[in-house]
Image (tube, rainbow, N blue to C red):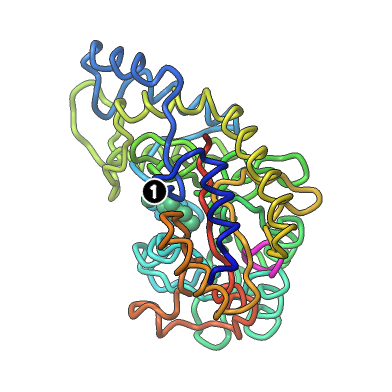
Amino acid sequence: MENFKPVTEYIKNLYDTREFIPLHVPKFRGKEKNYLERCIDTTFVSSVGKFVDQFEDQMVQITGTQKAVAVVNGTAGIQVALRLVGVKAGDEVLTQALTFVATANAIIYNHAHPVFLDVDLDTMGLSPKAVSAFLEDYGELRDDGCYNKKTGRKISACLPMHTFGFPVHLDELISVCKAWNIPIVEDAAESLGSEYKGKPTGSFGELGVFSFNGNKIVTSGGGGAIVSNSVSLAEKGKYLTTTAKQPHPYEYFHDELGYNYRMPNLNAALACAQLEQLDTFLAEKRNIAEIYADFFKTQSLNFRTELPNTKANYWLMCVELENKQDRDAFLKYTNSESVMTRPIWQLMFRLPMYEKFQKDNQKNAIFLEERIVNIPSSVR
Ligand SMILES: *Cc1c(COP(=O)(O)O)cnc(C)c1O
């Protein structure tokens, strides 16, 4: 255990404190208070207002997409994005078991079934090879899409997640999904500001979804955004998330089942001020990642850095321990020293509500589950 003392000492010096060091805390160094005050002065604090519009414009700019829809949180955004690409009750959605629970929950909210496929060791995200192998075994192309030969269910979407802001192998994944006629929704909740071959994550799938929860790289308190290069899909998303009401000066007419998944203007005001600082945060996190990378080399610990042709946002940084025993010792020591560290998620199929779903061998996911640990990653 003592051999992790240099690590805790280094992190305490890096963050210049002897107090508890959390994994990730928000920083409000921009126009947050100013925008919130302006928002209150307008009285438009709720579901419409100019900050919501401004936030959506900023997201279009940042992600290089055609349209963005502000929503109440990332989970709701994924739920609606899946519905938008045609996921219906009883369908299946291909995703990874190594993810935060919201990814899988959003599938169940559509009364669809997740199929858990393996991740790549290098990206920690959904493996195109695993998706391809699964489809070779179980996929059947019909006129109206891809079906699972084993269950007879339609496979109506693929939902990759860019773990901690490290992009998945998008070219390969897109090519497999295209061959099998399966639309992609990117769970880009963790990867705002990450890029794959010079293009922002979230802009590759039919739709991409971001989260602005308090622990993400920038925050609106709580919130999310759906982005798309299809204006019609995104407009449908806006419609569904704002109760599916037909525009009319005074009549209430809703022509299908919508949701109240709007982001309040008050939260959008916070998000606007935060997004203005995204580039600064990205640069500072990259700087911390470089410092960590140099340091962990001296400790013979594998600090995860971005892959060639990609840019990671370094939202949550992580190290890979030799084995589970070392990982447990690392977690125990660092946390006892007030340096917060946390293991990567338990695989979804270990959770009671996800035990029964189809999955592949999960070799890489299990390897990473036993070894990856997040370390303090806040901007300073
Ligand atoms: C944070 C997160 C979400 C959900 O975002 P909320 O805004 O908290 O609902 C979804 N997927 C992943 C992978 C996340 O990390």
Image coordinates for residue 284, horizontal then vertical, percent? 61, 34
Image coordinates for residue 118, horizontal then vertical, percent? 62, 75
Where are the magenta residues, as a range? 121-127
Confirm whether the magenta stretch covers residue 124. yes
- Examine the residues drawn in magenta and state their main secondary structure: loop
Q: Quadrant of residue 270?
A: top left
Confirm whether the magenta stretch covers residue 267. no
For this view, does 244 lie left or right of residue 379?
A: left
Q: Quadrant of residue 352?
A: bottom left
Q: Quadrant of residue 2?
A: bottom right
For this view, does 362 lie left or right of residue 296?
A: left
Write down the residue under mark 1.
Answer: 20
Image coordinates for residue 339, horizontal then vertical, percent? 46, 54
Image coordinates for residue 115, horizontal then vertical, percent? 51, 76
Residue in view at x 56 percent, y 54 percent: 164
Pointer 1 local density, CA inside 10 Å: few below 14, some 14–19, many at least 20:
few
For this view, does 167 lie left or right of residue 346?
A: right
The kind of residue tagged 1 is: Phe
Residue 249 vs 301, above or below: the answer is above
- Is residue 263 shown to the viewer in this render? yes
User: Which residue is farthest bottom?
Assistant: 150
